[in-house]
Amino acid sequence: MSVRIDLHDVECGECIVLDAGDEILMVDCGSSSRVIRSGNVRFFDSVRGRIMPRYRNARERSFLLTHCHRDHLNGLWRILRADPFYFDRLFLPVSPCGRDGRPLFLEFALYVYAFLSRRTEYSHLNTGVLRLFRRAAEAAGAARVYPVRAGDSFPFHGAEYDILWPPQEKFPFREDFAAAVDGLDTLLSAPYLPAAAGAFLRMKREFCSAYLACCANVPILPRDAAETGALLRDVGCLAPELRLLPCADRICGSLLSQTDQRMYSGAVNAASVVFQNRRDGRRRGPDILMTGDASPETLAAVESGLYDGYSVVKAPHHGTASAYSPLLEKIAADHILISSGVSGGAVAEQYAGLPGIKHCTSHAACAYFRSAGSCCNRLAVCCGMPRPALAVNCPANRPRGIPSAGAPRALPPCGIVTVSAAGGIPCFCDVRGKPGKR
């Protein structure tokens, strides 16, 4: 495989790097874990001490964010804090608009920002989408920030990669999520409320308009990013008055309800960037499908644009059962990447029955491993070796043949390495050697 792939074990999160030697594309970098237990190292220390140095010699480095959940995002800010020029390009997802033209993610997040900014209960559903482009522009420079949505493409290692999802317009938001946002607007539109209620609704419209204008330029313009920041500060200044409104408790109760939280989180996942390389008859490289935390409905929506087979498919949403799509059984994949965090939900048992080789960051959340006591790859045929053969014959699955974190070029034949803080992990998750001797 001309493009090597590193699947980083960040525990509860995701970081996958397509490595072409002199050029890399990092897809997400985040974790909900402060400490990665496999190496007993703090996540941010691992980013600076392990992930960043691994690609320091690359001539060109790009980053693509699939969506704004912190288990995919927060490592990016740590990288840019350490080195604002580490990435040459940042591909960031545009928050989509529904069929009525409204960017409901932004509207919902603005309610959270204004009414719940002091509530720790809501910290896991962050409002990072509101600051995404402004913060990236301030950290790395606006000229490095590229908004992406369905229909866009970008070059990597001599090939074009196409963004299949999400569409910027007519995004299929769930009706109950749209109704929840409309319900919040209705509460603030009641007659005889203090002026702060109407001011917030006006600011919300102005912020959404400025955000969409910011995303209209590629790369973004510094003044557009700054305007979104100024408008968000205005909302923050209004927040103390908003929390004194007669309807404030009802708004907070709605935002804090498990129903609204699940809808918002699920909607953000459903809008994850899905992308793949473009097949070119002149130059045939590995076919790669990256899915972020896409929902089954998302994959169904892009099915017509998918290939019949791939060298590598990234399992949606850490391989969890709730995100498993039967479409994966129709797509032939030689290799499947699963970032399986220990608290991200159980890995769908259907993956064990798929013929491709599974590359997992951990077996802690794997129901198949718990029941069988061994790895599902033991009887699978690996097409990444010089000749297709049982994965048990791969030299990387021998305890002393597993590449260490300090030797990123010592790769198995398939070119896919799962990298933990303690070293490399084979695609047999039940094979373990002593740290430093893997």
Image: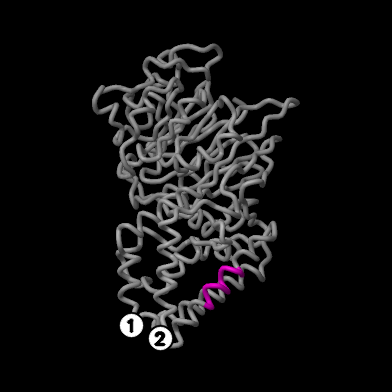
Q: Name which residue type carries label 1.
A: Pro
Q: Name which residue type carries label 2.
A: Leu
Local crowd at mark 2 within 10 Å, few (<14), some, or many (≥20)?
some
Q: Is residue 242 left or right of residue 299?
A: left
Q: Secondary structure at mark 1?
A: loop
In the image as oriented, which residue stretches furthest toward the right? 282
Q: What mark, if any, has residue 193 been given in the picture?
A: 2
Q: Disc 1 designates what residue?
A: 246
Q: Quadrant of the N terminus?
A: top right
312 to 204, vertically: above or below: above
Instruction: Tell me whether circle 1 and circle 2 mark residues in contact (CB < 8 Å).
Output: yes
The kind of secondary structure the magenta stretch mainly shows is helix
Q: Is residue 383 magenta?
A: no
Across and down, in percent, residue 341 comes to 35, 41
Q: What mark, if any, has residue 85 been given in the picture?
A: none
Across and down, in percent, residue 208 comes to 56, 68
Across and down, in percent, residue 163 comes to 61, 43
Local crowd at mark 1 within 10 Å, few (<14), some, or many (≥20)?
few
Quadrant of the image occupied by residue 144: bottom right
Across and down, in percent, residue 234 comes to 51, 79
Q: Earlier in the sequence, mark 1 or mark 2?
A: 2
Q: Residue at 51% across / 25% down in the picture? A: 333
Whether residue 95 is visible here, answered yes or no, is no
Q: Which residues are magenta?
A: 202-210
Q: Is residue 104 left or right of residue 218?
A: left
Question: Which of the two residues, 405 or 169, is positioned nearer the viewer here?
Answer: 169
121 to 315, vertically: above or below: below
Quadrant of the image occupied by residue 61: top right
Q: Residue at 35% across / 37% down in the picture? A: 321
Question: Which of the two residues, 246 or 429, is positioned nearer the viewer here?
Answer: 246
Q: Secondary structure at mark 2?
A: loop
